[in-house]
Amino acid sequence: MATIAENIQQVRQRIAAACAQAGRDVQSVTLLAVSKTFPAEAVREAIDAGLTRFGENYVQEGVEKIGALAGLRERLEWHLIGPLQSNKTRVVAEHFDWVHSVDRLKIAERLSAQRPPHLPPLQLCLQVNISGEATKSGIAPKAVRELALQVSRLPHVRLRGLMAIPEPAADAQAQRRPHRALRELLDALNREGLGLDTLSMGMTADLEAAILEGATIVRVGTAIFGRR
């Protein structure tokens, strides 16, 4: 069985190959290691292999891991990528650096109000239900513009871009379509002067398709830590 360090190297090679195919600088894509359900010891192995950005789906698990690795806090960047309920915004505002899963104004307003003043602005992405799945979180594409304009005006947070978890697809072209749609949404927002720079899209199975369509953050868990 490959080590976490070996897995990270393989993922980096995949990212580099996709960037070369897309004619992009490999530095334009950030690898976010999705460490949900894996212990702090596994995160520490990934840190030892050079990673500094980690994504957590569950608030309490993420906060516990942040605490367990508190001695390394200045080196690390913690991203909440899972659904966020309004009763958990305070602890997220106090502990995380990014939230990818904002899908309504109330959540963004609470994060803004509860962000401690001594911390830098909390970085936000709007989660878009790009495939229109009834069981998936996220705002409908047609509602993105209004929410983005509202969130961009809030203090103590900074709207960075969009996130999506597209419906699984069987082939590369089908994988690319929802990622392309998300990029086009971002482009439309930027034509209105929002200055967004982040497309959080692409996971273990479809990171190449996402990079070809402009992903700036790929969220990879299984290919790094193994199956849950």
Image: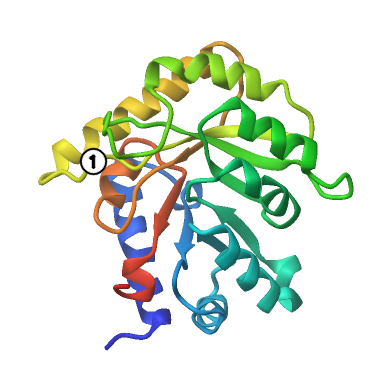
* Horizontal arrangement in the rendering, residue 179 relative to residue 170 (left or right): right
Location of residue 30 in the rendering, given as x and y in whole percent from the top left corner: 49, 53
Residue sitting at x 35%, y 56%:
15
- Disc 1 residue crowd, few under 14, some 14–19, many 20+, Cα 10 Å: some
Q: Residue 115: image x %, image y %?
A: 78, 44
- The vertical placement of 88 against 10, above or below, is above
The residue furthest front is 87
Q: What element carries label 1?
A: loop
Q: In which quarter of the image is residue 154?
A: top right
Question: Is residue 42 shown above or below 150?
Answer: below
Please state which of residues 189 and 66 is positioned toward the viewer in this rendering: 66
Compared to residue 199, the image places residue 119 above or below, namely: below
From this viewpoint, which residue is outermost toward the top?
192
Query: Toward the viewer: 67 or 26?
Result: 67
* Count of marks overlaid on the render: 1
According to the picture, the residue beneath numbered tag 1 turns out to be 167
Is residue 92 left or right of 4 when viewed as pictured?
right
Seen at 39% across and 38% down, the residue is 137
**Who's the residue at 63% across and 29% down the image?**
106
Q: In this view, does 109 lie above or below 111?
A: above
Q: In this view, does 140 lie to the left or right of 174?
A: right
Q: Give the image location of residue 117, x and y in percent.
A: 88, 44
Disc 1 residue type (three-letter): Glu
Q: In which quarter of the image is the N terminus?
A: bottom left
Figure quadrant of residue 122: top right
State the residue at coordinates (70%, 30%): 109
